[in-house]
Amino acid sequence: MTKSLPKFCFVIHPLSLDDVARYEPGAAGKGAPIIRKIMEWMPSYAAVHVTGIRTPDGREAEGWFVAAPLLPDQMMEFPREEVYKRIVRAIEIGAELGAQVAGLGAFTGVVGDGGVTIAERSPIPVTTGNSLTIAAGIQSLFRGAREMEIDTTQATAVVAGATGSIGGACVRLVAPKVRKVILVARNQTRLAKYHESIAGQLPCESSYTTDISAAVRQAQLILTATSSTQDVIEPEDLQTGAVVCELSLPHDVSRRVALERPDVLVTEGGNMLVPGNPRFERIREPGTEFDLNLPPRTALACMSETMVLALERRFEPYTLGRGIDINKVIEIERMATECGFTLADMRAFDAAITPEKIRATREAARLRGGSALSPVTAQRAMGAPST
Ligand SMILES: NC(=O)c1ccc[n+]([C@@H]2O[C@H](COP(=O)([O-])OP(=O)(O)OC[C@H]3O[C@@H](n4cnc5c(N)ncnc54)[C@H](OP(=O)(O)O)[C@@H]3O)[C@@H](O)[C@H]2O)c1
């Protein structure tokens, strides 16, 4: 008897009004107030059927993206119970379709207690997907640093959202590779307490601040994982030659950075290539592809964690809440690699970062004599002959 495919569901929601039109092409052109009003009463629904995921050793999985159609600010501002109800209903729809594990996308994993209450109310095990997001984010930040020729052992890193589920773990994983790490969040009391709890275990110098501009001005490496619905990284604060790894959804980095800072490398850190020939088919318009606003075969790392758990038949509440176990980050990274998932090519501001673009960014940083650059690169920028 053949074993049936393992199945997952993943709760999605639009991050912006542009996203709403991507989800529902009929919404294009309608005014924001109308769209927001419609979303207030719109129930959760199965949006996408995912097939074609296949590991190098031939294992397959099938799944559904189920929409809990609220914008990020609505998720944060609506009565908590109303939001939980929509998310739990989305998971129930997935479970009715056969899903054995559920992932929480973007703000559905942020709202409230980072998935804990939702998991208690869910008919199937739930994960936020944050463990693989953290692993991908760290890989991506240091890939960016290599590309920009930053000597990370001499670098100062900022983690924005440092008291969060993703940011808290990123602080601990960044610290062994840099000279100094600065923790940033808004709530001073929580930030001070978290810093006090880990400072003694960090192998590098550390400090904390609620002033994100002041922190960014000191840093060559920046990792953003805030739950802000507004931009928090502005072009005037960034050092020449800095690398920004963006994990937040919606994004934290102002679009002005793309226009005004050709010498800074911004990269979305949480995108992964899915093994096999994955297809994301719209359920309401069979035969048409759902536009994830990502290149082909690419998914978010949190989606990828849910897929990996299905492929590995680990139907368990893998990542929940705010104190993430680093061993789980290491384990899911290993499982993802074994299943054939790899970090996607660099991308930011809806466009691929080509090798030419990286060269141009490095060159722009050299011309400005970037403080983030390694001593050799900086010397070259000052006109010293290269060896
Ligand atoms: N790329 C992916 O695959 C992926 C996967 C999962 C999640 N995400 C995204 O990652 C982000 C973080 O998720 P999470 O689960 O770690 O959230 P979380 O646990 O709620 O943590 C959010 C952190 O951001 C801080 N924060 C909020 N607003 C801020 C601001 N304006 N300036 C500085 N810090 C601020 C919070 O502290 P204070 O409240 O004290 O400021 C907290 O430290 C979200 O945007 C989420 O959508 C991405």
Image: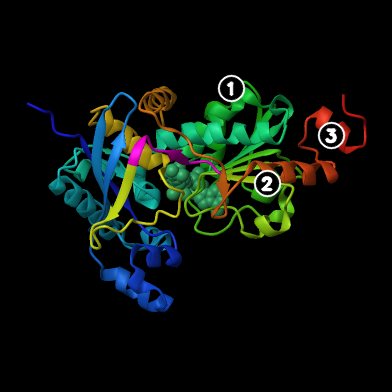
Distance between mark 1 and mark 2 Cα atoms: 40 Å
Which mark is on residue 30?
none
Residue 322 in sight: no
Quarter-wise, where is residue 283 in the image?
A: bottom left
Residue 285, horizontal then vertical, whole percent: 25, 62
Amino acid type, residue under disc 1 in the picture:
Gly
Q: What residue does disc 1 label?
A: 200
Residue 371, horizontal then vertical, whole percent: 80, 38
Up/down of 385 relative to 203, above or below: below
Residue 136, horizontal then vertical, whole percent: 49, 34
SS majority, magenta: strand
Q: Earlier in the sequence, mark 1 or mark 2?
A: 1
Which mark is on residue 378?
3
Mark 3 Cα shell of 10 Å, populated few (<14), some (14-19), many (≥20): many
Amino acid type, residue under disc 3 in the picture:
Ala
Q: Are marks 3 and 2 in contact (CB under 8 Å)?
A: no
Q: Earlier in the sequence, mark 1 or mark 3?
A: 1
Q: Left or right of 22: which side holds 217? A: right
Q: Residue at x 32, y 47 (%)?
A: 279
Amino acid type, residue under disc 2 in the picture:
Lys
